[in-house]
Image: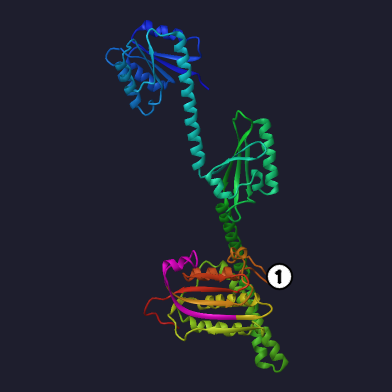
């Protein structure tokens, strides 16, 4: 910490030298000015800890210097001691009005001078330290970075608002916020920092305790100077959103890779399936009895394989099929007829759709695939049996209603197709990943994890969105909202 600076202002050279001599034995940095104007210039440059100011000076007297110092925002807190031979009550009142803090009467008593200067400079340094501490505390409190101060054992001494908003209820030790491997690494860094007074390197880790689901952070530990033992600053930069974006990018890369693989093999495999289907149709038409039945099964299986290839290819192709006017009530009934043959006898399938709905513009094959995916998912959710209700209706959504359905939703006129089941419902954890490519709760050998990802892609292609209503133990309902076509568009 630098020594205190004392500014002496006196037009009498003998008086200045006397004051300098009286303070020479103390640990002060002394600067001197011979008139008021020089004093104001020096004060602005050196920001002294105290000013010893003579009152009687030509041109700019001590009272005026005092007033100008108090009017300057950067100098107004400097303590001022007026040195004056004037011992009248009026002079002292005038000095107080100008902003003086203390008075010393000339001739100055050396002991009193040194005592007053020592006391005032000490108080001024303490005030400055308090101001610096207040600024530091404000900077920490309002920082968007999560900051906590701890001792060498990791006990939390102070945490700012961002840290409390990220963590929630604070544990006694900050290391309890992290998984065991990260906690051990940070503990080792604390011990090493305590010994070497070095800052710990950043550490990327997930958080065990957090208000944010699946939170992660980059942790930096810095040792701070402290007079009463080791003090450490933990800075947590919330990387949860960044990590989620990285995961999304990884999934997109997976989709891109799948598209490349699909485009490389789908043509050849499709040719093989067309050969199988063609030969099966010939057997159906020429054969009879068991041969005809088996040929039918071969043809249907090959057609299902072609449908699966088409689903995979949807992720790889860069151009979508052209949109045409479609009547969804008809398409829903056609798809439900196909689904009815696949759900089994333990599940009842009902359809609730008016004969005529507003037309939409879309790809009939893609929409058929959406209905099939949702219905088959509902079937798989009820291995012991249950019921599926497929319904279609025209709906009008306000902005408030749309926001409650999906982040992709918007206000407007829609035709909604719903698939509701009486299965076990969907937990909050699973619901967060429902539409992620390759995510599935089924066995990997029987599921691709592309069904709902396909549904989401198709809906976005149709400028629509998907809503999910579910409660554990009370089934689930997926609703797809298709924008109504412009007036005058006739459905096929």
Q: Residue at x 69, y 36 (%)?
A: 191
Crowding at label 1, few (<14), some or many (≥20) Cα neighbours within 10 Å? Answer: few
22 is higher (above) or lower (below) than 414:
above
Q: Residue furthest right?
A: 290
Q: In which quadrant is the C terminus drawn?
A: bottom left
- Relative to 371, 181 lies left or right: right
Q: Residue at x 50, y 28 (%)?
A: 129
Q: How many marks?
A: 1
Q: Residue furthest left?
A: 59
- Relative to 375, 114 lies left or right: left
User: Residue 398: percent from the left, percent from the top?
Assistant: 41, 69
Name which quarter of the figure residue 471 lies in.
bottom right
Q: Residue at x 59, y 68 (%)?
A: 263
Name which quarter of the figure residue 20 lies in.
top left
11 is higher (above) or lower (below) than 339:
above
Circle 1 sits in a helix, a strand or a loop, which is it? loop
Give the magenta range: 388-412
Q: Residue furthest front?
A: 89
Q: Residue furthest top?
A: 14
Question: Can you identify the residue that label 1 sits on?
Answer: 445
* 438 magenta-colored: no
Q: Look at the image and name its color scheme.
A: rainbow
User: Residue 125: percent from the left, percent from the top?
Assistant: 48, 24
Q: Residue at x 35, y 20 (%)?
A: 41
Of residues 342 and 49, the one nearer the viewer is 49
User: Residue 297: percent from the left, percent from the top?
Assistant: 68, 85
- Relative to 190, 492 lies left or right: left
User: Residue 98: percent from the left, percent from the top?
Assistant: 32, 22
């Amino acid at each position: 910490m630098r020594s205190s600076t004392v500014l002496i202002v006196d037009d009498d050279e003998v008086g200045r030298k006397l004051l300098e001599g009286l303070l020479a034995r103390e640990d002060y940095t002394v600067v001197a000015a011979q008139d008021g104007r020089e004093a104001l210039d020096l004060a602005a440059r050196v920001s002294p800890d105290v000013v010893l100011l003579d009152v009687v000076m030509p041109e700019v007297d001590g009272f005026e210097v005092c007033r100008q110092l108090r009017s300057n925002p950067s100098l107004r807190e400097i303590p001022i001691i007026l040195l004056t031979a004037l011992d009248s009550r009026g002079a002292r009142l005038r000095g107080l009005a100008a902003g003086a803090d203390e008075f010393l009467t000339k001739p100055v008593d050396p002991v009193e001078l040194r005592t007053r200067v020592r006391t005032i400079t000490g108080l001024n340094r303490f005030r400055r330290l308090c101001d610096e501490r207040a600024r530091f505390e404000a900077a920490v409190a309002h920082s968007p970075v999560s900051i906590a101060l701890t001792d060498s054992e990791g006990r939390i001494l102070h945490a700012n608002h961002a840290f409390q908003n990220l963590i929630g209820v604070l544990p006694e030790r900050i290391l309890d916020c992290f998984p065991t491997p990260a906690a051990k690494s940070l503990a080792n860094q604390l011990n090493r920092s305590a010994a070497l007074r070095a800052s710990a390197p950043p550490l990327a880790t997930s958080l065990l305790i957090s208000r944010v689901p699946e939170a992660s952070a980059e942790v930096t530990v810095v040792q701070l100077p402290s007079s009463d033992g080791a003090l450490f600053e933990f800075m947590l930069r919330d990387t949860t959103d960044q990590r989620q974006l990285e995961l999304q990018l990884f999934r997109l890369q997976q989709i891109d890779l799948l598209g490349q693989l699909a485009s490389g093999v789908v043509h050849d495999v499709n040719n093989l399936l067309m050969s199988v289907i063609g030969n099966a149709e010939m057997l159906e038409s020429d054969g009879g009895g068991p041969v005809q039945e088996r040929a039918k099964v071969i043809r249907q299986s090959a057609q299902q394989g072609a449908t699966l290839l088409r689903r995979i290819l949807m992720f790889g192709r860069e151009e979508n099929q052209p949109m045409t006017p479609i009547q969804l009530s008809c398409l829903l009934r056609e798809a439900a007829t196909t689904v009815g043959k696949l759900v089994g006898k333990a599940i009842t399938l009902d359809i609730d759709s008016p004969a005529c709905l507003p037309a939409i513009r879309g790809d009939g094959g893609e929409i058929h695939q959406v209905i099939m995916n949702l219905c088959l998912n509902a079937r798989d959710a009820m291995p012991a049996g249950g019921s599926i209700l497929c319904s279609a209706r025209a709906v009008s959504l306000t902005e408030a209603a749309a926001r409650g359905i999906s982040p992709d939703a918007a206000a407007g006129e829609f035709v909604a197709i719903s698939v509701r089941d009486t299965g076990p419902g969907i937990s909050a954890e699973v619901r967060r990943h429902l539409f992620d490519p390759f995510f599935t709760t089924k066995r990997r050998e029987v599921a691709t994890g592309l069904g709902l990802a396909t549904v989401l892609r198709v809906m976005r292609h149709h400028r629509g969105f998907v809503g999910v209503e579910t409660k554990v133990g009370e089934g689930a309902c997926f609703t797809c909202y298709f924008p109504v076509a412009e007036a005058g568009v006739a459905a096929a």
